[in-house]
Image: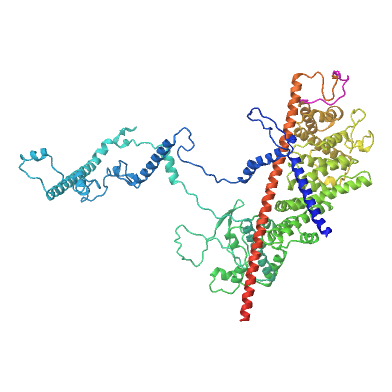
Amino acid sequence: MGKPQKKPQKKNASLADKVRKTKTSTQIKNNPFEVKINRKKFDILGRKTKHDVGLPGVSRSKAINKRKETLLKEYKSKNKSNKFVDKRFGEYDSKMEPEEKILQRFALERQRTHEKKDIYNLNEEEELTHYGQSLAEMEKFTHLGDSDDEPEERGALSAELTASHFGGGGGLLRKKTPGEQEGGGGGSLKAKSRQELIEELIQKSKQEKRERQIHKEEAHELTEKLDQEWQSIRSLLAHKNPCRGGGPSDWQDDKPKLDEYDMRVRELAFEMKAQPSEKLKTPEEVAIETKERLQRLEADRQRRMLGDIVQDSTQTRTHMSADDLNDGFILDKDDRKTLAYQDGKWNVDEESVGVGDEEEEENDDDDGEEGGSEEEEEDDEEEVEDDEEEEEDSHSDLDSEKESGGEEEEEPQSDVTAQRSLTEEEKKSRQEAAMAELPYTFTAPEKFSEMKALLHGHSPDNQVIILARTQKCNHPSLAVGNKLKLQKLVGFLLEYVGELATRNPPELATIDKIIPQLYVLSQMFPDASCQAMQAILAGGARTMEEALRVKGHAAFPSLDMVIYVMVTALLFPTSDFRHPATTPALLYTTQALNKCPVRSLQDVTSGLALCCLAVEYVSLSKRFLPELINFLCGTLHLAVPDRTSIGSSVVPPFRPSRSGRSSELLVLSDPLSCHSWTKSQMSLLAVQHLDFQNDTHRDHHRLTCLSTCLDLVKRSCLLYKDLLSFTHIFQTIGTLLSKHLPVKTYPTVLQELTQEILESISGAPSMIRPLVFEKKKPIPMNMFTPKIVEILDYGKKKGSNREEREREKLKHKYKKEFKGALREVRKDSRFLAREKLNEIKSRDVERKRKVKELFGSLATQEGEWKALKRKKKQR
């Protein structure tokens, strides 16, 4: 029995312990010795209050409550503009009494309602309008009609009539005054009745109308009389001046001269108006028409090759007289011939005896029927715009089928004679002529070998025609894959140009004629042409680097690479700061001028050719090329006969040795060869091969190289004359020309050119001085003894003045305030983040509650539905 009694005692003891512990904890929390009280003496505007009273943590709760009252409200009202603004009169005026506010509001309300009601009140003195015009002003207008029955002043009513009709009879039935009653016949007469007054008004209005009509008739008669007498008066008004003869026949009217403005108006009135021109065709339409025309010409050529008769569809020019009525009347035969002026002579067109016997020379579209004259074909293919008449004149499949269909009965007599049967020899000659012609349509080559086979065996002019027709038949707007085909054609043409340059002898004329077609393609596809040229130049630079790495020296670029550099300048702009094609070409040129050693006269020729190209590249941008100036200076060193007296030395690619064959490449072997030399341009063929018959011929080439070098020096002087270091750069060249070169033994042309170069070098002002070492060492700057401050206490300096102390205080205060502000900003951010998280959590809780309610209602409905279904089954 004791055991069960002890258990509740222990339980009670544990509860008492818990209560005791809670009491002690609350007592500890509410310890009055921990309460901090800061007494506030007075309030200061703008200073934060720190005199909070309470336990530790109370200030934190107050800060949170303060943020809830300020920051939280701003956050909740963010992006909300719905505010109630009281716009009643005097609501925010504290000086007005409430009774005065009520009276003013009542007066404004009555005034507002009064204005609304008086809008349509006609009793007020307001101006009435009709269609924007004043009714009072409209009464002043007169009737412009010619009818005599209507009054002249239409719409104007008399005051009595207006009063009688619109005034309610007030004017007619008004009471008479005593004076009016007495004045009429001593008072014996009675007042007039309403009927009598109306009759008087009618008679008065009729009388007024009659008077107006009479006045109008009189005015009309006077106007007619004045018009009749005007003719006689007009002759008297004209002023006449006597002329030289003095006779009556010489008298003339003095007409007033026209003003300049009137003359300009008359000129503009009689000026020819601009006529509408035909609609310009788009490049796509032009390409389609060109391809169709070439297809028609090719079809005609194929039929001529097979021996079929192809009629000329050109419309012959017929003579038309000025008296022709153009009524369709046609003579049996017109023997008159049409005259034309061609090549300075009169050209008489002869009648065509048969189809294809004689083709007209004016027709530029019928290229295949001119008996193999390919020059006219080329001119025709370059013209893109073709008129509709020219298209009708050209050969077409439909015209040839219609003309060969056998409808001879409807053709005129001339067409019947033109369709005479040809002999076998004539047919054979026609077939051979058609086979000798170039095809009019070509497919774009897919490989380089196909393009070579396409151009093989043709003259340069025919190759240009083939390329032009290939481009027109495969225009990018005609099919989807044509763009890629023509892009490949650009690379094939560049490769073909290099092959033509490497042949023996090089076909430079063919390259010259192919470049325009290459330019057209490069304008159509600039990216593809840039990539193809980059690949070629990169290959040439790679070959040069490999030769330098393996052999230690590299030869100058061959003729094909020189032509590629020249073509690059023709196809792409050279004045750009950086270009994907011209920049690599210029770098390749300068690399060759710097790294390829000069060993022979042919190397000098190749280097000068590259210098010419380099000058062309920088002629617009005026970019300074030190490799160019170095090569020109070294070339002039090669013409000095005695190099021991030269103070300067050459640098690579020239050898610094003062003796040897390579150091005197441009020294003349015979000074007398200057007399037989004539100035001429250097040929590109000299870059690939030099063949001298004798020493005189060799000296002539040396003089040509010197002439080219001096021309390049002159162009460089003009190009770089604006440089600050112009005199310093060309100082070595001027010394060579004035002291060391035997200029007096050279021809007169070279002497004059040398004198011009020296004048341009000496005439330029020296803007800067060359860098030299100072003769004396510069005086060093005065060094001051550092200031040593003795520090007695750690962190404090002795001897600081008041300004420094104030500055330190301000810095310390700034740091403290900055830290406090940063701390408050972080607390505000954390507070807002907590509030946002609480909003999200509350929304999620509410959403979950609603979802649970929906699921519960659905489950209830499902249970009820199953119960009903079960009951139905039981029934």
- Residue 771 is a magenta residue: yes
Q: Residue at x 79, y 26 (%)?
A: 768
Q: Residue at x 54, y 58 (%)?
A: 338
Residue numbers of the magenta segment: 765-785
> From where the camera sits, is residue 296 visible?
no
Q: Main secondary structure of the magenta part?
A: loop
Q: Is residue 323 above or below residue 424?
A: above
Left or right of residue 287: residue 749: right
Q: Name the quarter where the N terminus is drawn.
A: bottom right
Colouring rule applied to residues: rainbow
Residue 789: x and y, percent? 84, 20
Tally of numbered discs: 0
Q: Residue at x 13, y 42 (%)?
A: 176
Left or right of residue 814: residue 226: left
Q: Name the quarter where the C terminus is drawn.
A: bottom right
Residue 448: x and y, percent? 80, 59
- Residue 492 is a magenta residue: no
Q: Quadrant of residue 873?
A: bottom right
Q: Is residue 800 above or below residue 152?
A: above
Q: Residue at x 63, y 63 (%)?
A: 358
Q: Nearer the viewer, residue 807 or 539?
A: 807
> From where the camera sits, is residue 172 visible?
yes
